[in-house]
Structure formats: C-alpha cells, structure tokens
C-alpha cells in the first residue's frame, strides 16, 4: 500500500475532461432551491464539476448536452443558467489560484 495521498479527480460535465478536483468548480444542487456554484466544494447536495479555467464554455456545453441536468439528476428549471454563468465569471481569484 502506498501512503501517497490519492489525488482526487473529477470529470467536467461540459468537456468531459478528467482533472484534479482543484482545477474544477463544483456546482451543487441543494435540497431546496436552485443549483449554485460551490467554490468551497463543501455544500451539501448533489454536485457536478466544471472546469475553472474555461469561463462559461463548459457550462454552455453542459447545458447543450443536458449533462449538468443529468449529473444533478434534476430538471432544467432547477438550474438558473444565467446566474450560474454570471457567477462563473466572478469566482473570486483567490479561489482560482491554488498552490502547486
Ligand atoms: Zn470542462
């Protein structure tokens, strides 16, 4: 058994790239309300991941392919696409830059 920590990886629901979790941004669907960005990755609810560094490109793809809806096992009306896109553009930089 190796004692090296496993690097958690997730798949972007937009472009399907498998990347380290820190390069992705979590979208959470809470029990109540609509899907939202979860920059801390700690909120309760079903989650899906989008690339951090592609702006809204992966969100747009995920919307077109219904991949986010499927990943969150919900319906499109639980997802406020416009506000998610706006939030993606304003994710705080300190969340974006993680030490290597
Ligand atoms: Zn992506």
Image (cartoon, grey):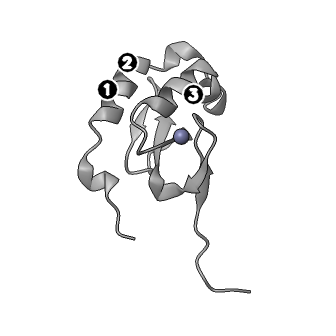
Q: Is residue 92 above or below residue 100?
A: above
Residue reaching furthest right? 1
Q: Residue most toward the top?
A: 77
Question: Which image quadrant: the N terminus?
Answer: bottom right
Do the residues under discs 2 and 3 have CB atoms within 8 angstroms?
A: no
Q: Quadrant of residue 71?
A: top right
How many numbered circles are shown? 3
Q: Position of residue 60 (x, y in %)?
A: 50, 24
Indicate which disc residue 34 carries: none
- Sequence order check, earlier mark of 2 and 3: 3
CA distance for labels 2 and 3: 13 Å
Label 3, label 1: how far apart the Cα atoms are: 15 Å
- Which percent across, then down, holds residue 81? 43, 19
Judging depth in this view, the residue of 28 and 23 nearest the camera is 23
Q: Are marks 1 and 2 in contact (CB under 8 Å)?
A: yes
Mark 1 CB near ligand 1 (8 Å cut): no
The numbered mark at residue 86 is 1
Residue at image coords 46%, 54% = 23
Circle 3 packing at 10 Å, graded few (<14), some (14-19), many (20+), is: many
* Residue contact between numbered discs 3 and 1, judged by CB atoms under 8 Å: no
Question: What's the residue at 35%, 69% (across, down)?
Answer: 99
Q: Is residue 14 visible?
A: yes
Residue 31 can be seen in this image: no
Q: Is the C terminus in the top left, top right, bottom left or bottom right quadrant?
A: bottom left
Name the mark on residue 82.
2
Write the residue at 31% across / 58% down: 97
Q: Is 26 on the left-hand or right-hand side of 82? A: right
On screen, residue 45 above or below 73: below
Residue tagged 3 = 62
- Mark 2: give few (<14), some (14-19) or many (20+) Cα within 10 Å: few
Cα separation, mark 1 vs mark 2, equals 6 Å
Q: Position of residue 63 (x, y in %)?
A: 55, 21
């Amino acid at each position: 058994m190796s004692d090296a920590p496993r690097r958690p990886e997730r798949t972007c629901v937009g472009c399907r790239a498998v990347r380290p979790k820190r390069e992705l941004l979590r979208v959470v669907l809470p029990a109540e309300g609509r899907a939202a960005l979860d920059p801390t990755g700690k909120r309760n609810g079903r989650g899906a991941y989008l690339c951090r560094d592609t702006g809204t490109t992966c969100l747009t793809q995920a919307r077109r392919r219904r991949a986010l809806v499927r990943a969150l096992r919900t319906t499109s009306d639980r997802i406020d696409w416009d506000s998610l896109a706006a939030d993606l553009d304003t994710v705080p930089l300190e969340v974006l830059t993680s030490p290597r």
